[in-house]
């Protein structure tokens, strides 16, 4: 796994009234600080990629549908430089994915309906100076293919 990435299983608590699932707590070891909370979505088959942050750590939880999230570590000096990770987040795999600064990330909706991710990053978004550094979704600079892999 890419250095600094963490996968935290989430546990839905269900009864006859419905479900409750804690997404993130300030008393957990992975909690650094609070920047904001936002929702991002993708329609079936849509890829939103690639970008990284210099300061911000992201904490993704997919609350509707399923997302394939890919990560690429370009960081000089990282013990996992050049490594690619792939994760499947969503209703069939409730996890929180921690993405550290400097790691490229993106996602693709792999469900039949719109998928939704709640992100709790460590920094608030700055419209004047966004902490986002982008590449196209289908670039040769990252060794990853967004197409479905029928193994």
Image (cartoon, grey):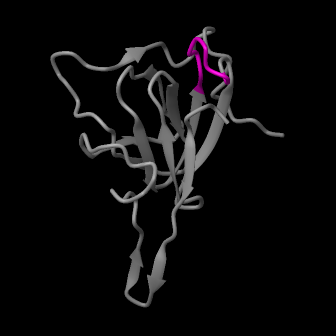
Relative placement, left or right, of 143 versus 127 is right
> Nearest the camera: 50 or 78?
78
Quadrant where the C terminus sits is top right
Can you name the residue that lies furthest to the bottom here?
Answer: 16
**Which residue is found at the position 54% from the left and 55% from the top?**
8
**Which residue is found at the position 27% from the left and 44% from the top?**
34
In the image, residue 62 lies at what x, y percent? 46, 51
Question: Which image quadrant is residue 64 in?
Answer: bottom left
User: For the magenta stretch, what is the residue range?
Assistant: 72-80
Please tell me whether residue 45 is drawn above or below residue 115 in the rendered image: above
**Which residue is found at the position 40% from the left and 34% from the top?**
57
Please tell me whether residue 60 is drawn above or below residue 90 in the rendered image: above
Magenta span: chief secondary structure? loop
> Nearest the camera: 122 or 140?
122
In the image, residue 70 lies at what x, y percent? 59, 32
Residue 114 shows in this picture: no
Relative placement, left or right, of 113 versus 143 is left
Residue 46 shows in this picture: yes
Quadrant where the N terminus sits is top right
> Nearest the camera: 38 or 57?
57
**Which residue is found at the position 27% from the left and 46% from the top?**
37
In the image, residue 86 lies at what x, y percent? 65, 37
Whether residue 76 is in magenta: the answer is yes
Can you name the residue that lies furthest to the left here?
Answer: 128
């Amino acid at each position: 796994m890419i250095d600094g990435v963490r996968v935290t299983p989430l546990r839905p608590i269900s009864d006859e009234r419905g479900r409750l699932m804690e997404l993130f707590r300030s008393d957990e070891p992975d909690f650094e600080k609070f920047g904001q909370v936002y929702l991002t979505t993708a329609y079936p088959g849509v890829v939103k990629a690639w970008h990284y942050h210099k300061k911000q750590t992201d904490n993704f939880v997919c609350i509707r549908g399923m997302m394939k999230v890919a990560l690429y570590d370009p960081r000089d000096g990282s013990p996992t430089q050049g490594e690619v990770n792939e994760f499947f987040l969503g209703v069939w795999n409730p996890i929180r994915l921690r993405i550290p600064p400097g790691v490229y990330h993106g996602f693709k909706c792999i469900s039949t309906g719109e998928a939704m991710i709640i992100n709790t990053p460590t920094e608030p978004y700055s419209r004047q100076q966004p902490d986002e550094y982008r590449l196209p979704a289908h670039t040769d600079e990252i060794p990853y293919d967004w197409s479905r892999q029928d193994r």
